[in-house]
């Protein structure tokens, strides 16, 4: 009997990346992604966090292929080179693309025995047992979790096509949970569970420039070097040795390590007989060393001046209930040390693009609404119209008007939440009179049913008001959003206003307060 051929799947040459050209969809490998980028419209990966991770990997590879990763280039030389590349109708140089993926020092074999792509081969001996295929696939229940919405369970594990497994592999590297990993023994130390560190993008929302073709998109994605760099920059698949869990973290060099080398998780896929499917996975911690600080170029960064230095900078959290237009102020305003946020660093490079390219660029939003540890709520994606012509550097009046309107919309959302809650309390308890419980003790406060439906009704009205305000700069933003909040409050309370005795009076008082000129009420703004 002939020996069975080893399982193989090559991330460079086997199809696993969904792409779109017009209304035609297909899958390609990394090599084909770059060879035909100028003929493709966009990625079509259905899972937003997978697409977000792939865009970072593709940006690092694009920098390598185009030599835009050369730290010796001056800012003017770097910008001029990128403009020349954007003007090429033939896309990326095929010789450079093939030279990169044919380089024997780079390993894209997914099931390579020594250097599997984005995996750690040591897990096969350092973990007593695999974690189960359901642990790899987001959305499947694993372990003791109940199968509420899925037919999958650990007693009957269903293999996953390798193309799909790679997309979920990216999610764990970038958005993976803390805790819950398979114990791992390194050397003579006792087995340890994955401890305390989640993926570098967990619970964040990313903003990526989107061009007319994938070629434009990938070139616009490449971040520019800021500062100096002396250490060599290496992506995981360019490293000649497998990752060492005991080694201290390498310096956060540009662009490879910042974009592809910050994972806190180690994985090893277990292939089926021919490599077309993955039947199991090892999932555990990658390192016990604390990660080095790094700023992802696609995230909005918030600053807090009154907190500890190590906590003053944090990325904007993803919120699946938040429409993209509410992020516009953070994307269009130029960096300013007095603001509480900073736009993604990638937007600082877009002003140097040719005018015809910049004016057509849209923004792709990829968010994964999660808590900081293990719970996943929902991922989401959105694409904006071309908005970079509104940037503060090009249209300061428009940018300031957008910032004013976004701030007013958010302020009135907070006011609406507070006043809807207060109106319910005034309706059920009377103004300023808490309900008495047993033995004269204050009763537990009942949950107010009005704020949530009021907010749900408010945001569509606020979006309509927002675009109307941009077209009519003489209108008052405060009045427009106060009116939207009033309409939302009345819609959310219409049934109770006719049913409950004191509701009409409480709602009228809340409406009057919504239209009152702003006062400093920190207790309301925090709610």
Image: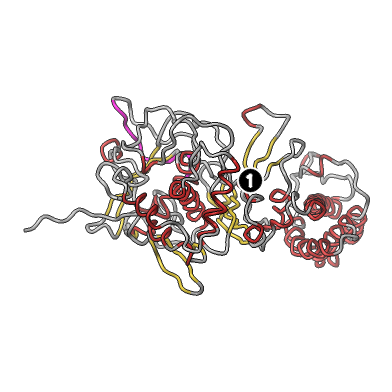
Q: Quadrant of the C terminus?
A: top right
Left or right of 438 on screen, residue 25? left
Q: Residue furthest top?
A: 188
Q: Residue furthest left?
A: 1
Q: Residue at x 34, y 31 (%)?
A: 191
Q: Which residues are magenta?
A: 176-187
- Principal secondary structure, stretch drawn in magenta: loop
The scheme the figure's colours follow is secondary structure
Q: Residue furthest bottom?
A: 23
Q: Is residue 358 at all visible to an observer of this figure? A: yes
In this rendered view, identify the residue nearer to me: 42 or 151: 42
Is 342 located above or below residue 354 in the figure?
above
In this rendered view, identify the residue nearer to me: 351 or 137: 351
Please provide percent x and percent y for residue 86.
54, 57
Left or right of 435 on screen, residue 92? left
Q: Identify residue for label 1.
A: 344
Q: Is residue 181 at all visible to an observer of this figure? A: no
Q: Quadrant of the N terminus?
A: bottom left
């Amino acid at each position: 009997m002939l020996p069975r051929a080893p399982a193989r799947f090559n991330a460079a040459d086997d199809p696993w990346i969904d792409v779109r050209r017009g209304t035609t969809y297909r899958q390609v490998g990394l090599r084909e992604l770059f060879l035909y980028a100028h003929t493709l419209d966009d990625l079509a990966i259905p899972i937003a966090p997978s697409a977000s991770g792939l865009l970072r990997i593709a940006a690092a590879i694009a920098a390598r292929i185009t030599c835009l990763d050369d730290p010796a280039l001056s800012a003017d030389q770097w910008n001029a080179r990128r403009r020349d590349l954007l003007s090429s109708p033939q896309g990326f140089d095929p010789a450079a693309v093939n030279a990169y993926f044919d380089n024997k020092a780079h390993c894209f074999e997914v099931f390579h025995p020594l250097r599997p792509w984005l995996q750690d081969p040591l897990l096969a001996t350092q973990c007593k047992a695999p974690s189960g295929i359901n642990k790899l696939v987001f959305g499947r229940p694993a372990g003791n979790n109940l199968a509420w919405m899925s037919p999958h369970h650990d007693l009957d594990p269903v293999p996953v096509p390798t193309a799909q497994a790679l997309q979920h592999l990216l999610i764990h590297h970038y958005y993976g949970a803390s805790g819950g990993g398979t114990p791992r023994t390194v050397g003579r130390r006792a087995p340890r569970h994955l401890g305390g560190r989640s993926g570098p993008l967990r619970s964040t929302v990313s903003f990526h420039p989107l061009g007319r073709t994938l070629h434009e998109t990938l070139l616009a994605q490449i971040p520019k070097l800021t500062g100096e760099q002396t250490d060599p920059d290496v992506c995981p698949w360019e490293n000649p040795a497998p990752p060492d869990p005991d080694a201290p973290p390498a310096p956060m060099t540009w662009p490879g390590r910042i974009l592809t080398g910050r994972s806190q998780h180690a994985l090893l896929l277990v292939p089926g007989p021919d490599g077309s499917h993955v039947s199991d996975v090892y999932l555990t911690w990658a390192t016990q060393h604390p990660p080095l600080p790094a700023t992802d170029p696609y995230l909005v960064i918030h600053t807090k001046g009154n907190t500890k230095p190590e906590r003053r900078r944090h990325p904007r959290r993803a919120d699946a209930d938040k429409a993209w237009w509410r992020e516009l102020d953070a994307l269009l305003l130029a960096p300013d040390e007095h603001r509480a946020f900073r736009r993604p660093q990638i937007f600082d490079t877009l002003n140097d693009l040719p005018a015809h390219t910049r004016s057509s660029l849209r923004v792709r939003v990829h968010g994964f609404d999660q808590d900081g540890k293990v719970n996943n709520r929902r991922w989401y994606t959105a694409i904006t119209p071309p908005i970079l012509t509104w940037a503060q550097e090009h249209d300061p009046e428009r940018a300031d008007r957008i910032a004013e309107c976004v701030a007013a919309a958010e302020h009135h959302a907070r006011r609406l939440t507070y006043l809807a809650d207060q109106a319910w309390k005034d309706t059920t308890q009377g103004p300023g009179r808490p309900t008495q419980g047993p033995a004269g003790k204050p009763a537990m406060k009942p949950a107010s049913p009005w704020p949530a439906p009021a907010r749900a009704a408010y945001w569509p009205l606020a979006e309509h008001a927002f675009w109307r305000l941009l077209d009519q700069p003489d209108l008052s933003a405060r009045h427009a959003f106060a009116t939207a909040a009033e309409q939302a409050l009345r819609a959310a309370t219409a049934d109770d206003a006719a049913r409950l005795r004191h509701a009409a009076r409480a709602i009228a008082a809340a409406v009057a307060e919504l239209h009152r000129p702003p006062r400093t009420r920190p207790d309301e703004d925090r709610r």
